[in-house]
Image: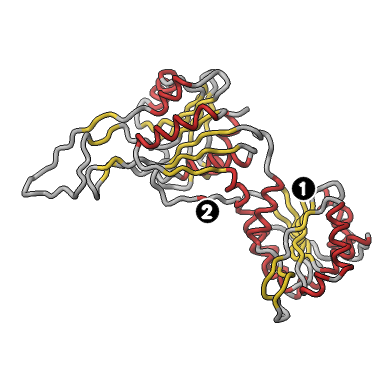
């Protein structure tokens, strides 16, 4: 989304660059508009650097009508901080500087304000009247919060933190394309215990699965994320507002993942199984650390783990979509195609260890999405968030 961040002349303006950074990290394009007084607290160079775009602050610069062109460009306007002055101007229809003029021109599009002022000012009947009027027009208020204020007192008037404002923006921009749907995603490795301190595992980080869960939630879906051991958590998701829509179940072994996945799948519209599940486990697990005892080697008997993907493929209905992943090192597409057919999948996502920058542990990936209908879509090397978006758009279109 294209977002204009408006900054007014309050001490909380120093937090505006962090808000811009968070919005850009979430994938939005950002431009800034500032009042003359805002530039007493944060510099033009800072705002232009973090946004990567020229700052709009002079209504009469070179005779331009920036308030119109910026309104046409922007899809949302976020004012942070929103002082009592700018709130009063908008409520009264006053347009006497760059930002207030832009605000009045920004009709018909979403506007979010993050009020920040002295607690006595916030409590004043005139301010409260203006705030209620703006709310009735559809302008959303985020905060203010209670806390220590720049004037040395404590009370309600502190601007909401940039993370909270960014979360409100992302909640407002959340797509409803998959609203009402529930999806299952598996992520990460599984650990198969040898004894109390050792296990058989792999290098999967879980990053691809977590990115897929977030991409589904962005489209309005509720997500059941079953994850093997990984350092990732709900705090990993870039958009904090999405965390309530992603329900995480942590497991360790393939059998635990099998149980969680098979229980969740019947209630889901689809499943994307990106976890790197161990095919085998030791037939026995010692409850203590196995000692070398002078032996030159250790012999493990391995038994096969239940096949989660094949089980779901045998259970899925015509209304459900099932997507698997294949990591291949030779005869890649042929092996992936056989896996798709054998396990009754609708799509399979092929990873190759031959592609530099793709595979385990990295932040990028390069995939080929193969459909049962014969479709074949290749991605260039992209961030795993971008790859996740491509996969979701493909399998839910």
Q: Residue 11 occupies which quadrant of the picture?
A: bottom right
Q: Is residue 153 left or right of residue 191?
A: right
Report the disc number at residue 235.
Answer: 2
Q: Residue at x 42, y 27 (%)?
A: 309
Report the disc number at residue 230.
Answer: none
Q: Residue at x 42, y 21 (%)?
A: 343
Task: Name the foreground residue: 380 vs 360.
Answer: 360
Q: Residue at x 54, y 40 (%)?
A: 213
Q: Where does label 1 land, which residue? A: 75
Residue 153's spot in the image, x, y percent? 71, 79
Q: Residue 35 occupies which quadrant of the picture?
A: bottom right
- Answer above or below: position of 82 versus 278: below
Kind of element beneath mark 1:
loop
Q: Residues within 10 Å of mark 1 (few under 14, many from 20)?
A: some
Dot 1 or dot 2: first in sequence order is 1
Residue 79's spot in the image, x, y percent? 77, 60
**Quadrant of the snapshot with the C terminus:** top right
Q: Is residue 89 left or right of residue 30?
A: right
Residue 317's spot in the image, x, y percent? 53, 19
> Which of the two marks, 1 or 2, is nearer to us in this view?
2
Q: Residue at x 41, y 30 (%)?
A: 326
- Answer above or below: position of 39 versus 310: below
Task: Name the foreground residue: 88 vs 54.
Answer: 88
Residue 293's spot in the image, x, y percent? 7, 49
Give the residue at the far left of this rendering: 294
């Amino acid at each position: 989304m294209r977002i204009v961040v408006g900054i007014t002349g309050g001490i909380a303006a120093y937090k505006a660059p962090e808000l811009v950074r968070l919005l850009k990290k979430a994938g939005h394009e950002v431009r800034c508009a500032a009042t003359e007084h805002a530039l007493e607290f944060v510099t033009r160079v800072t705002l232009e650097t973090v946004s990567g775009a020229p700052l709009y602050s002079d209504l009469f610069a070179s005779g331009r009508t920036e308030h119109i062109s910026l309104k046409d460009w922007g899809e949302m306007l976020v004012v942070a901080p929103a002082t009592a002055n700018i709130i009063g101007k908008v409520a009264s229809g006053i347009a006497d500087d760059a930002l207030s003029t832009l605000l009045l021109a920004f009709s018909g599009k979403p506007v979010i304000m993050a009020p920040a002022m002295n607690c006595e000012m916030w409590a004043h009947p005139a301010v409260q009247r203006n705030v209620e009027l703006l709310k009735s027009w559809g302008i959303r208020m985020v905060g203010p919060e209670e806390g220590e204020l720049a004037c040395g007192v404590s009370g309600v008037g502190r601007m909401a933190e940039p993370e909270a404002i960014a979360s409100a923006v992302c909640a407002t921009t959340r797509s409803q394309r998959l609203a009402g749907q529930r999806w299952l995603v598996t992520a990460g490795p599984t650990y198969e215990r040898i004894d109390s301190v050792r296990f058989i595992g792999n290098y999967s980080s879980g990053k691809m699965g977590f990115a897929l869960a977030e991409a589904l939630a962005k489209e309005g879906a509720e997500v059941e994320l079953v994850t093997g051991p990984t350092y990732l958590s709900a705090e990993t998701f870039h958009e904090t507002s999405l965390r309530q829509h992603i329900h995480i179940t942590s497991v360790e072994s393939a059998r635990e993942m099998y149980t969680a996945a098979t229980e969740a799948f019947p209630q889901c519209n689809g499943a994307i199984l990106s976890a790197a599940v161990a095919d085998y486990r030791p037939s026995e697990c010692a409850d203590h650390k196995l000692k070398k005892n002078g032996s030159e080697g250790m012999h493990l008997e391995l038994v096969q783990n239940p096949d989660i993907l094949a089980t779901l493929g045998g259970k899925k209905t015509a209304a459900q979509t099932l997507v698997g992943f294949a990591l291949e090192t030779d005869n890649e597409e042929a092996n992936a195609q056989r896996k798709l057919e054998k396990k009754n999948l609708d799509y399979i996502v092929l990873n190759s260890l031959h592609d530099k920058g793709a595979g385990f542990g990295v932040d990028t990936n390069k995939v080929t999405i193969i459909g049962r209908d014969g479709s074949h879509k290749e991605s260039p090397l992209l961030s795993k968030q971008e790859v996740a978006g491509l996969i979701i758009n493909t399998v839910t279109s």
